[in-house]
Amino acid sequence: MDPYAVLGIGPDASPGEVAAAYRRLAKRFHPDRAGERGARHMAEINAAYDQLRDVHAPSEAVGARA
């Protein structure tokens, strides 16, 4: 699965663009609005967003103490 294609964005999308694309699609395909078909598509949208959110998440500072 290409998470960029699922969200309809390019690989150069900023974290804000990733989040905006997710919100736009979530509103359209949420199961309460789009039924069972939307639920299947929403699962794919969630997986793509989770994957990209992990990629775009700021990494922990080296040597940071808890």
Image (cartoon, rainbow, N blue to C red):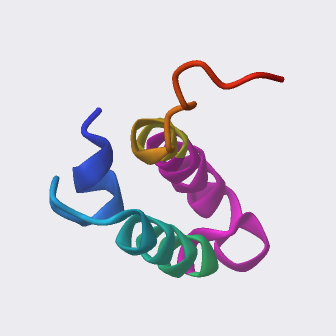
Q: Position of residue 65 (x, y in %)?
A: 76, 22
Q: Give the overall secondary structure of the magenta segment.
A: helix
Q: Position of residue 49 (x, y in %)?
A: 49, 50
Q: With respect to residue 65, does 60 lie above or below?
A: below
Whether the magenta-drawn stretch holds residue 44 is answered as yes
Residue furthest right as drawn: 66
The residue depicted at 58 percent of the width and 48 percent of the height is 46
Q: What span is in magenta?
A: 28-49
Q: Position of residue 23 (x, y in %)?
A: 56, 75
The residue depicted at 59 percent of the width and 45 percent of the height is 43
Who is closer to the viewer here, 26 or 49? 49
Who is closer to the viewer here, 41 or 13? 13
Quadrant in the picture for the N terminus: top left
Displayed quadrant of residue 13? bottom left
Displayed quadrant of residue 35? bottom right
The residue depicted at 72 percent of the width and 65 percent of the height is 31
Q: With respect to residue 34, does 2 lie above or below?
A: above
Left/right of residue 4 with respect to residue 50 in the rendered view: left
Left/right of residue 14 with respect to residue 57 in the rendered view: left
Q: Position of residue 3 (x, y in %)?
A: 32, 44
The residue depicted at 41 percent of the width and 46 percent of the height is 56
Q: How many marks?
A: 0
Who is closer to the viewer here, 2 or 57? 57
Q: With respect to residue 30, does 45 lie above or below?
A: above
Whether the magenta-drawn stretch holds residue 55 is answered as no
Quadrant in the picture for the C terminus: top right
